[in-house]
Image: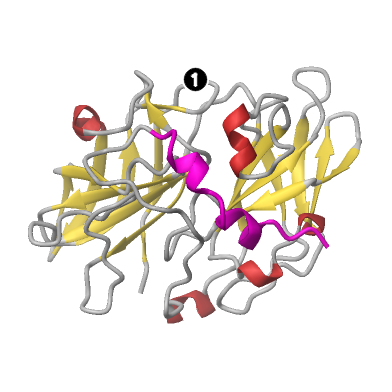
Amino acid sequence: MNRMYFPLAQWAWFLVSILVLSGCQQARREIRLSATVPEIEKNREAKILTAFFGLDNALPQRSRALYFKAPGKDGMPIVFSQEVDPSTLEASDFEVYTQSGDTFGVEAVTLLPAEEEFELRTALLIGDYGNHPDNPPISVKIVGELMSRAGKNFKGQIQEVIPLEEGPILSYAEYFTFTEDYPYVAEGVGCDCPRASTEMVVKAVWAGGVRATNGEELGDAELDRFEVTMVQGNDTSVVKPYQLADLGDNDNNIDLCLNVPGIPIKVAVKEHTAIDPRDDQNPKTDIEVVSRW
């Protein structure tokens, strides 16, 4: 059995040390489970939302922090509709199918670097899944007993793979507020929106890790490129975040900090706002926003 998540968390500090950080201070990386699982998850379907052929024979040397044989391998982030139960995650849970009909197993799988509470819905598959453009991967299937934290089984789910040359899209988005028991992170890698000035947070989960088109962290320069449709009583309006948060951690989660009340129902991002690790730019992308609770 190839379980990569807990051993990797013990030395993922190496990856953190090479990141370009926001104003938050650097902190050690480890997988963190939330104290509770949202009750609403029990009524939602457990499925794969996106599978993204992010890198073809091109994982960089720093990916040794995720898996010591990772450099030069393929990288494929898988985003799920629910958080994964880490104790059930194994490389053997996945099969990848290529254009020519080949079947590939997965060499290693990890939930890093998206390791924070309520983020454990992205698994990075590391291995060999064919080659672009002659025989690229076209679909991925869950063949093992992979469970969600809400107790649902992902087994049997199959998803088409977003081709290598396409840019990143939004996979999932949820809204939440800072309740008294929220595990607020005031500083450190992936720190939260400012508590005092934030009315609502929208967590936008991309198909893979993203940066701004200049190669730097997403930030103030990109604020106008995010639009959130909000319901406020009987009215609907489109607002923009006043700040971005959950930055500097090299994962696919970005928090949009909103300073107006209301219920977010959709988030949209203009084209050419973000790039993936291959520098492919995103198309215009939008997605429904659901409630965390």
Quarter of the figure that contains the C terminus: bottom left
Look at 34% across and 50% down and name the residue there.
Answer: 190
Q: Position of residue 264 (x, y in %)?
A: 26, 57
Look at 55% across and 22% down and name the residue there.
Answer: 278
In the picture, measured across the screen, residue 149 lies left or right of residue 235, that is right
Residue 222 is at least partly visible in this image: yes
Element under disc 1 = loop
Look at 73% across and 31% down and name the residue there.
Answer: 73
Question: What amino acid type is highlighted by mark number 1?
Answer: Asp
Question: What residue is disc 1 on?
Answer: 279
**What segment carries the magenta color?**
1-19
Residue 241 is at least partly visible in this image: no
Look at 49% across and 59% down and name the residue there.
Answer: 30
Q: Would you identify the image quadrant in which residue 48 lies?
A: bottom right
| Foreground pick, 136 / 60 | 60
In the picture, measured across the screen, residue 109 lies left or right of residue 104, that is left
Quarter of the figure that contains the N terminus: bottom right
Would residue 169 be counted in the magenta stretch? no
Q: Position of residue 130 (x, y in %)?
A: 82, 29
For label 1, count other residues whose C-alpha is less than 10 Å away and answer few (under 14), some (14-19) or many (20+).
Answer: some
In the picture, measured across the screen, residue 76 lies left or right of residue 195, that is right
